[in-house]
Amino acid sequence: MELILDAMLDALIDGVKMLPFLYLAYLLIEWLERHHGERIENALAGGGHWGFFPGALLGCVPQCGFSAVASNLYASRVITPGTLLAVFIATSDEAIPLLAAEPSQWSSLVLLIVCKVIVAIAGGALLDMPLRRVLPRSLYGGYAGNAADVDCHEEHEEHSSIFLAALRHTLEIFAFILVFSFLIGLVFESVGEDVLVSALGSMGIFQPMLTALVGLIPNCAASVLLAQLYVQGAIGFGSLFAGLTSGAGVGLAVLWRVNPSWKQNVFITGLLWAVGAAAGMLLQLVL
């Protein structure tokens, strides 16, 4: 019981400390969505064969709506697979506001964003240029279906106050943070922090392969978990990068729902994991 109470108290204290930063981050995100969301989507759709450039930059906006829109645009043959891959790689979902809420992690956040943009541009360019000429045509194109915007936010948010919408998102992620911080803290207290870190560290450069699999879970909980593990020192930067690179928010779930070609969906999903794992392993060796 003492272990449980200690873990709960530590999780609550750590979570409350980041609340102001978290709210300000979501306030900025809501403002971007309300006032510039349509322009961002139009820029993504109008990129043509060079769409991986705006895709890599726009994917960094920390929310899951654009990855869902990109999936619809790909299924409707509006954007190239390279553009879709660039958006997916650049997407970091809830990890950016969570790391922004920790001033001690700001340098890691900047490095994360810069590396993700570079990898997203490189991955999109390789897929749309040299690889497109050698891979089967069945892995490209897609279904010319409905390109209606799919957003991960409820409709009432568009009519609610920007301050209330930001508060709702803050409280939702705060709940995730409390749960994961409590569970991680409980494991640390019962098993021992040194033992857990040593177990994960024993995986060496293969650790990013595991976190890249976690990143494929189409839910913001995955990015929150990865960010929490990194902040608490359980995984390295390379493993965090691997998980957040393969993590595309709800984008993958939307892709599997709107695009009828299972070959294309398997290809994009597998490629996303491979890029995340490879880039994470490389960073694990370099950093």
Image (cartoon, grey):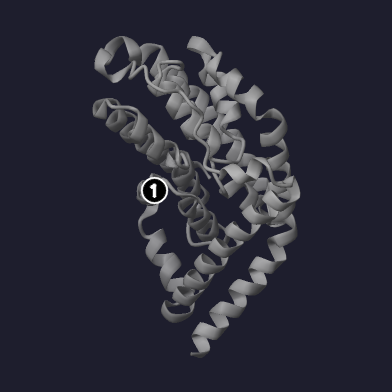
Q: Is residue 175 left or right of residue 186?
A: right
Residue at 68%, 49% in the rendered image: 165
The image shows residue 11, relative to residue 3, as above or below, that is above
Q: Which quarter of the picture shows residue 177?
A: bottom right
Q: Is residue 135 above or below residue 255?
A: above
Image location (x, y in percent) of residue 80: 43, 17
Q: Is residue 139 visible?
A: yes
Q: Which residue reaches farthest bottom?
A: 1
**Which residue is rendered at x = 62% and y = 40% of the image?**
111
Q: Residue at x 39, y 50 (%)?
A: 214
**Is disc 1 surrounded by few (<14), some (14 to 19) or many (20+) residues within 10 Å?**
some
Looking at the picture, tell me which residue is in the foreground, 193 or 59.
59
What is the count of numbered marks? 1
Task: Say whether residue 282 is visible.
Answer: no
For the point 54% across and 44% down, the residue is 93
Q: Foreground residue, 10 or 149?
A: 149
SS under mark 1: loop
> What amino acid is found at the position of numbered circle 1 in the picture?
Ile
Nearest the viewer among 238 and 12 is 12
Q: Which residue is mark 1?
A: 217
Establish if 117 lies above or below 172: above
Q: Position of residue 139 (x, y in %)?
A: 28, 20
Point out residue 4 in the picture as x, y percentages from the top left corner. Answer: 50, 83
| Residue 103 point in image, percent of width and height | 72, 55
